[in-house]
Amino acid sequence: MTDALPPPHVIDSPLCTAEVYDHGAQVIRWAPRGAEPVLYLSTAAELEAGSAIRGGVPVCWPWFGPGREPGMEPSHGFLRTTPWRLERRTDHQDGSVELVHRITSDDVTSPHWPQPYAVELRSRLGTTLEISLTTSNTGEEPIDYEEAMHAYLSVGDAHQMSIDGLVGKSFYDKIFKAERRQTGRVRLSGETDAVYRTTGGVTIDDPASGRRLRVTTTGMSDIVVWNPGERKAREISDIGDGEWQRFVCVEGANVLGDAVTLGPGGTHTSTYRVEVLER
């Protein structure tokens, strides 16, 4: 028998509605006041201790996917399945709400990545969602890590949506294990898993929902686009039936050759932002 997660922190402000779990310090719902949900949360999500939550904005750290060496588990690192400490909540004068979570190597570590560290996550929720991840090397040796904000963005129809801002960008196609260059807007035609090398923003045009979403990052070298497609989605137990059509992951990341190296006492901050635009 597994333990259900404690309830999330609920934000209901003049600017937005949102829910944030201490588990993984994960924002699972967010929408500007009066708007439809911006983040997808699977109807089959496992809201249990030790499990990854399928949806919202999972934090991938200190490795991405299966990692860069064989045998690294769990997928996407150990921070997304671990409870973080809520350090404080701040209700700002502009109406936004900020939650600050923290976790260190005294709380959780891994034989695959035993180095000392401290990580702080700031989630600022208002008309824009802004999530900042600050990693500190608290040890005496350099550390090398991957990171990503694995955002599941809700769309009306994944087949109709397109992503602008990546034309001409080089990317690594993880499905075919090949280097490619983007020509035209990104459109989904099946399983997609691509790591684009870019620091520029992207816009998700979602005609089925009648809106656009704008994603920008700082401190991140990559944009990852992921959707399992129909066939792969059938193999993933915590994606609801047919729900692969209801989201696209557009992630900010430092992965593969863009992993971050920090010397002793060094820090690095990466920030992911998403806002709703009229179409």
Image (spheres, rainbow, N blue to C red):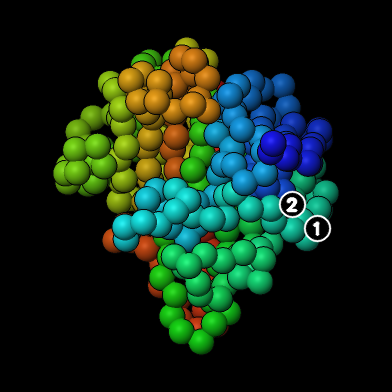
Residue at 40% x, 25% y: name it. 235
Q: Nearer the viewer, residue 192 or 91?
A: 192
- Asked whether 71 or 221 is in front, the reply is 71
Residue placed under numbered mark 1 in the picture? 88
Q: Quadrant of residue 34?
A: top right
Tell me the element at label 1. strand
Q: Compute the Cα span from label 1 to label 2.
A: 6 Å
| Residue type highlighted by circle 1 | Arg
Task: Point out the residue furthest to the front here.
Answer: 1
* Amino acid type, label 2: Leu
Instruction: Determine the image quadrant of residue 107.
Output: bottom right
For disc 1, the neighbor class at 10 Å (few under 14, some 14 to 19, many from 20) is few
Question: Residue at position x 56%, y 76% from top?
Answer: 116
Q: Position of residue 246 (x, y in %)?
A: 49, 19
Across and down, in percent, residue 30 comes to: 66, 33
Quadrant of the frame with the N terminus: top right
Residue 40 at what x, y percent from top left? 56, 27
Q: Earlier in the sequence, mark 1 or mark 2?
A: 1
209 over 68 or under it: above or below: above
Quarter of the image for residue 258 reads: bottom left
Tell me the SS state at disc 2. Answer: strand
State the residue in front, 26 or 122: 26
Q: Which residue is mark 2?
A: 99
Residue name at image x 44 percent, y 53 percent: 73
Say if mark 1 contacts mark 2, CB within 8 Å: yes
